[in-house]
Image: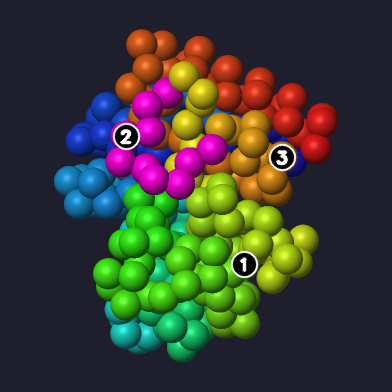
Amino acid sequence: MSAKDKLIVALDLPSAAAAARLAESLRERVGVFKVGSELFTAEGPVLVRYLVTNGAKVFLDLKFHDIPNTVRAATREAVQMGVSMLNVHAAGGRAMMAAAAESAREASNALHIPPPLVLGVTVLTSLTGEDLQEIGMEGGTENAVPRLARLAQAAGLDGVVASPREIAAIRRACGPGFVIVTPGIRPATAEANDQARIATPGAAIQAGADFIVVGRPITAAPDPVAAAAAIVAEVGKALTTS
């Protein structure tokens, strides 16, 4: 996998038109485009279908978290849109995650297309140990994240979404073949914004991330193409030294 392929850009923009323009400018620099809750709620599936039709890979970041039957149906619809990656909340439990994994396989087989990566969201990168304690999860992120990753793996998921700080613990718990997608990526010169557990692109790759997710440091940059190119260059350097 090339350095470019490891970069996922979060299209957290208010309109499909703006997101499509940005994606078109970045398509030679980026491996995957992430469509999340803001854009999907504003515009529905139109942008996802547009990107897929034009040959882009899409990570549908809606973090399904519901009863297993509902998540099974939602996953089927995501597969039919042609997405390359999708996610569910690991806190939804083993049965819910298994329903998503099974639905992805069944739907892709029926359509004769490669199945998407189905990922479990462990602990949001905006949360701290104090936040987890407040909602009744003891032991901090260092315990919660690998525990949820093991559960996701047992349920048949392809990997997890986790902050850079937990990559090593997930690798120890789940082995080298388990996919780790890492948000909370900030170049050294960027603001943390609302992310609590962050790392630079190079540090995340050297720690063992398979993909990194970058949003505002690219999408809000004066020159998004140059910002993306700089991150890809940093990822490439990390790959040669890791």
Q: Position of residue 62 (x, y in %)?
A: 34, 59
Crowding around mark 2 (Cα neighbors within 10 Å: few <14, some 14 to 19, many 20+) is few
Number of numbered discs overlaid on the protein picture: 3
Q: Going from the N terminus, do you reach mark 1 or mark 3 first? A: 1
Q: Which mark is residue 180?
A: none
Whether residue 201 is visible, yes or no, is yes
Of marks 1 and 3, the one in the foreground: 3
The quarter holding residue 201 reads: top right
SS category of the residue bearing label 2 = loop
Local secondary structure at mark 3: helix
- Say which amino acid is labelled 1: Asp
Q: Residue at label 2?
A: 193
Where residue 141 appears, as percent x and y from the top left, is: 48, 63
Give the quadrant of the C terminus: top right
Q: Nearer the N terminus, badge 3 or badge 2?
A: 2
Give the residue number, with chain letter if any, for mark 1.
158
Q: Amino acid at mark 3?
A: Gln
Whether residues under marks 3 and 2 lie with C-beta atoms below 8 angstroms apart, the answer is no
Residue for badge 3: 206
User: Disc 1 or disc 2, which is closer to the eye?
Assistant: 2
Dominant secondary structure (helix, strand or loop) of the stretch shown in magenta: loop
Residue 232 among magenta residues? no
